[in-house]
């Protein structure tokens, strides 16, 4: 990674290799680069990634836009292009000042109040001008014709904003072009006014219906890209050695999607002529435009498949899922033309355990402590959650007092509106703010089950906000909160961090709530029992603290004879069931110590086998929750339980002994 770039854990291949590849101009030529989209749910580090890239690009032409801010202002794509052009046109020591004369001309034309018939004639003239693709000073007569069509220009400034626009048009041409054109236009007005304000406001007077305005936006984008290509030609080619960069944050908004569509359509209209622009954007929602060549892991059920356009490239992969940061180096080998176009989707949000260790080490916590492992298990590597929880727990962490980690999550914090809340409650409000309140409550209910198939069973979840079957499933899929887990058949689960937050809310529902913890898990258990899914039913039994039912089921392979022998296949199947069942959620007393909880719920079974199984199951159940036993105080109980259960069980016992070694 180049010196001076802030390190973002897990994204070195993006801020380093990928950005450098996007900036490179082999032999001084532009290449057809895709729009790089950093995808991820809330809190996955998308904006932080753009900040790091902006710092890398400080000395080259670059511009930044946050669509969420502009969405509130209802700004059109052509106005956003003006923002981008203004920032790209700032003077940089090596690159000088990029000029956008065609774009400014389009803004000048559309700033005048004109009749629809005359305006369309003006637009045709602009298209003719852009099609010629010649230096602007050679098209003086055409420019004058266009200006006349929209109301005329008097020497004293008959069109509002003309002095500022004229000055910027001439400044954009460079010294030599300025002198040539100034000599032909004898009555050139003087420059007055605030250039920046004029550029931001001038395009707001455009007229026409939606289709008309879309056509106008397309012309603006054509002008913008044509100006950029022109800026990298001629005498400037030798000093402009790197591409310009546009950083677009929160492009999931309607305005962001329209802007990206306008940009990609303009590139398509260019007939394959590349431009010197690297576009990197972020989104926390799936964009339907990507369906033509990419695949969301949770596609809408029954959605028709689309035929991929011939010009789309995905490096030979057929409708790939968004790429991972670990794929970047192989996707973008140095020196090879990119084989991705017009999109390159990159999924963020999954830090590795080593990344979490790296974050903790930078916070002056020894990397061999138990805190990194705790953070990773609790958040499943969600970047925002790791940072937030670390900030809350670092000062309280003490390996001798495991309960301090649990207490930290219930510590009072100040919410965004100034009210007092807890860390977990604040996290829930932040993560679910994209969903309406009824959908949030439905999602809390659905979190009881291992996967989100419950969203299709109204007898389990009383969906109050769904207008059609699977509507909430699609919504959380589009918001990138679902994960696909392979098995005998593909099934989808909530992101573990989000689900943990939702389960805390489910556990806090009062006894008189129609869908409290007990009622929801009972519904789930009865449903799975009815449909012959016994393991899933026992999963919910354990969530209901019905340990006896779980022990009775898991004890069946040993029931006939305490020393019954089972083979390797039987041992593998039994361990798989044990893992599924003991992963059940809990609402245990957060103030009680782990061993206290174990004694309370394991109890005293009737026989030796039942006692061994009971203590093993409950210990594993508590330990499966990162908040249940963060200090690992139950490990010796679990190890001893596996060894005792394996005694005299034949060839399959080796697997039980091996499992015991994990807890040594």
Image (spheres, rainbow, N blue to C red):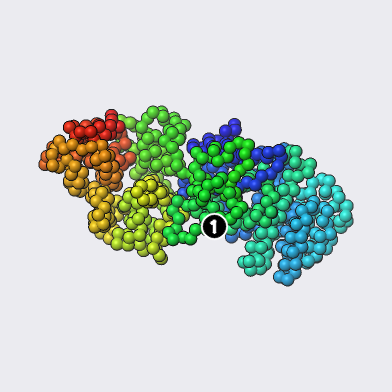
The residue lying at 55 percent from left, 46 percent from top is 316
Quadrant of res 210: bottom right
The front one of 528 and 336 is: 336
Q: Quadrant of the C terminus?
A: top left
Where disc 1 sits, the SS reads: loop
Quadrant of res 597: top left
Q: Quadrant of the N terminus?
A: top right
Residue 44 seen in render: yes
Residue 620 seen in render: no
The front one of 592 and 15 is: 15
Image location of residue 534, percent across then percent down: 24, 51
Q: Residues within 10 Å of mark 1 (few under 14, many from 20)?
A: few
Image location of residue 381, percent across then percent down: 42, 41
The residue lying at 25 percent from left, 59 percent from top is 512
Residue 267 versus residue 355 in the image, above or below: below
The front one of 513 and 1 is: 1
- Which residue is labeled 1 in the image? 307
The residue lying at 35 percent from left, 55 percent from top is 453
Q: How many numbered dots are placed on residues in this image? A: 1
């Amino acid at each position: 990674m180049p010196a001076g770039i802030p390190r973002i854990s897990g994204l070195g291949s993006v801020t380093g290799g990928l950005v450098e590849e996007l900036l490179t101009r082999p032999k001084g030529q532009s290449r057809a680069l895709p729009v790089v989209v950093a995808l991820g749910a809330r809190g996955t580090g998308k904006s932080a990634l753009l900040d790091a890239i902006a710092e890398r690009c400080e000395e080259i032409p670059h511009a930044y836009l946050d669509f969420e801010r502009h969405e509130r202002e209802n700004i059109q794509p052509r106005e956003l292009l003006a923002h981008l052009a203004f920032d790209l046109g700032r003077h940089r020591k090596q690159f000088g000042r990029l000029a956008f004369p065609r774009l400014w001309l389009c803004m000048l034309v559309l700033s005048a109040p004109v009749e629809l018939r005359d305006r369309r004639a003006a637009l045709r003239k602009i298209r003719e001008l852009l099609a010629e693709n010649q230096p602007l000073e050679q098209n003086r007569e055409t420019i004058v014709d266009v200006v006349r069509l929209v109301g005329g220009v008097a020497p004293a400034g008959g069109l509002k904003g003309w002095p500022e626009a004229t000055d910027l048009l001439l400044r954009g041409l460079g010294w030599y072009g300025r002198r040539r054109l100034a000599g032909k236009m004898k009555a050139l007005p003087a420059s007055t006014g605030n250039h920046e304000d004029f550029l931001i406001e001038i395009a707001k007077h455009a007229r026409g219906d939606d289709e008309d305005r879309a056509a106008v936006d397309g012309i603006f984008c054509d002008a913008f890209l044509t100006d950029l290509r022109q800026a990298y030609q001629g005498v400037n080619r030798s000093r402009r050695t790197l591409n310009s960069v546009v950083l677009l944050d929160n492009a999931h908004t309607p305005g962001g999607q329209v802007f990206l569509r306008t940009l990609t359509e303009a590139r398509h209209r260019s007939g394959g002529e590349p431009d010197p622009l690297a576009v990197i954007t972020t989104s926390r929602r799936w964009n339907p435009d990507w369906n033509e060549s990419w695949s969301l892991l949770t596609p809408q059920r029954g959605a028709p498949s689309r035929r991929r356009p011939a010009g789309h490239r995905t490096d030979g992969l057929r409708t790939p899922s968004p790429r991972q940061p670990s794929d970047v180096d192989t996707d973008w080998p140095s020196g090879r033309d990119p084989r991705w176009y017009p999109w390159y989707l990159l999924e963020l949000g999954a830090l590795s355990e080593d990344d979490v260790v790296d974050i903790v080490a930078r916070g002056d916590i020894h990397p061999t402590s138990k805190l990194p492992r705790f953070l990773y298990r609790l958040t499943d590597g969600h970047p925002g959650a790791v940072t937030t929880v670390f900030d809350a727990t670092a000062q309280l962490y003490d390996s001798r007092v495991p309960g301090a980690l649990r207490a930290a999550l219930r510590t009072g914090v100040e919410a965004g509106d100034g009210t007092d809340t807890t860390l977990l409650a604040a996290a829930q409000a932040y993560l679910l703010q994209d969903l309406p309140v009824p959908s949030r409550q439905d999602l809390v209910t659905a979190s009881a089950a291992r996967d989100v198939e419950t969203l299709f069973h109204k007898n389990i979840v009383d969906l109050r906000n769904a207008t059609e079957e699977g509507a909430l499933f699609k919504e959380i899929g589009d918001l990138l909160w679902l994960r696909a887990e392979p098995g005998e058949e593909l099934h989808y689960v909530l992101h573990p961090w989000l689900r943990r937050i939702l389960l805390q809310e489910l556990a806090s529902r009062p006894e008189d709530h129609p869908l409290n913890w007990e009622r929801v898990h009972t519904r789930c258990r009865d449903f799975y029992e009815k449909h012959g899914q016994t393991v899933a039913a026992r999963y919910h039994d354990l969530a209901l603290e019905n340990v006896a039912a779980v022990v009775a089921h898991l004890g069946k392979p040993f029931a006939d004879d305490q020393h019954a022998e089972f083979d390797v296949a039987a041992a593998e199947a039994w361990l798989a069931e044990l893992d599924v069942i003991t992963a059940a959620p809990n609402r245990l007393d957060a103030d009680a110590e782990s061993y206290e909880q174990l004694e309370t719920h394991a109890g005293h079974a009737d026989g030796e086998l039942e006692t061994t199984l009971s203590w093993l199951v409950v210990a594993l159940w508590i330990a499966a929750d990162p908040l249940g036993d963060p200090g690992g105080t139950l490990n010796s109980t679990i190890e001893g339980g596996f060894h005792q259960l394996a005694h005299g069980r034949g060839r399959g016992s080796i697997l039980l002994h091996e499992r015991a070694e994990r807890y040594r």
